Amino acid sequence: MPDWNDDPRFWDSLDNLVSVSWKPLKELIDILSETDDLPLQTKALLMGGLGTFTRIYATRRSESNPPPMAFQSAVESVYSNQHVKALMGQAADAMVDSKIEVMKEGSE
């Protein structure tokens, strides 16, 4: 069995998924964007992750880029999204705080 990134079924399925989901996903994200009280997790996962990936992948494919190039561009865009970065920073801070607490408890 080929690796996932060498399997043409993966790329065909991804193209199909993005082509049928981009418009309704964009409508959903546009609605969510109208509110200021979304939790960071929602912004990061739905808007910064899924929304960014789908938008960039669809755009790159419409520019005739091959699927692997469109995929790489979409993943890079997700990593650089401000909401995703904020969520990752929040998770890192929580992990550090937890380790500090454990170290404090161990020294008492």
Image: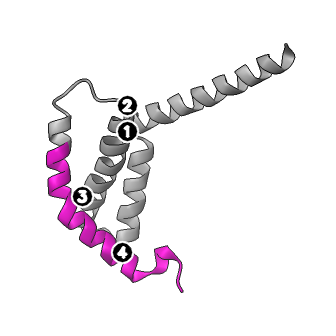
Residue 68 as seen in the image, left or right of residue 13: right
Residue 59 as seen in the image, left or right of residue 74: left
Describe the element under mark 4 as helix, strand or loop.
helix
**Residue 1: horizontal and vertical position, in percent?**
54, 86
Kindly identify the residue that appears in the image at 43 percent across and 51 percent down: 76
**Residue tagged by mark 4?**
11
Residue kind at label 2, given as amino acid type? Leu
Describe the element under mark 2 as helix, strand or loop.
helix
Of residues 70 and 89, the one nearer the viewer is: 89
Q: Earlier in the sequence, mark 1 or mark 3?
A: 1
Residue kind at label 1, given as amino acid type? Ala
Tell me: residue 37, above or below residue 87: above
Q: Earlier in the sequence, mark 2 or mark 4?
A: 4
Circles 2 and 1: CB atoms closer than 8 Å: yes
Foreground mark, 3 or 4? 4
Q: Earlier in the sequence, mark 3 or mark 4?
A: 4
**Residue tagged by mark 1?**
44
Foreground mark, 2 or 4? 2
Look at the image and say whether residue 50 sits in the magenta stretch.
Answer: no
Look at the image and say whether residue 24 sits in the magenta stretch.
Answer: yes
Magenta: main secondary structure: helix
Kindly identify the residue that appears in the image at 45 percent across and 45 percent down: 79
Describe the element under mark 1 as helix, strand or loop.
helix
Tell me how far mark 2 sits from mark 3, CA to CA.
Answer: 25 Å
Q: Which residues are magenta?
A: 1-28
**Residue tagged by mark 2?**
40
